[in-house]
Image (cartoon, rainbow, N blue to C red):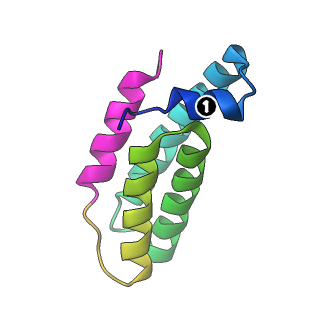
Amino acid sequence: MPPIDHDHLARQTFGDAELARDLLALFAGQCRRLLPGICDPALPPAERADLAHTLKGSALGVGAGSVAAASAAVEDTLRAGREPGTDALAHAVAATLLAIPHG
């Protein structure tokens, strides 16, 4: 699975390349803001699950399937009362940021 499904993103932005670039830039910033909190075991699990849920939704919107899947797994694990591993999410975010120009 590519880090970004550009066909999905084009459909979401009605083929507007500038809008797609803007959305990807916003998504990259959101990844950088949310990931530290998601990975911080000192934060309450519900807060971390909410952060993961937010990242999942954003990832689905731009076609970042691996970030969405990894975020969902972390969210589900936290909501089940267990401590998740966050390596898969961190790797998915890193790979996706590399695929975003100026990400």
For image coordinates 51% across by 32% down, the residue present is 28
Q: Quadrant of the N terminus?
A: top left
Quarter occupied by residue 16 = top right
Q: Nearer the viewer, residue 90 or 39?
A: 90
Mark 1 crowdedness (10 Å alpha carbons): few <14, some 14-19, many ≥20? many
Q: Nearer the viewer, residue 8 or 34?
A: 8
Query: Percent from the top left, x then y, of residue 95?
Result: 32, 32
Q: Is residue 8 visible?
A: yes
Outermost residue, bottom side: 81
90 vs 98: above or below: below
Q: Is residue 2 found inside the magenta-colored segment of the image?
A: no
Query: Percent from the top left, x then y, of residue 92?
Result: 33, 42
Query: Percent from the top left, x then y, of residue 19?
Result: 71, 22
**Secondary structure category for the residue under label 1:** helix
The stretch of residues the image draws in magenta is 86-103
| Residue highlighted by disc 1 | 9
Q: Is residue 26 visible?
A: no
Residue type at the position of mark 1 = Leu
For the stretch drawn in magenta, the main secondary structure is: helix
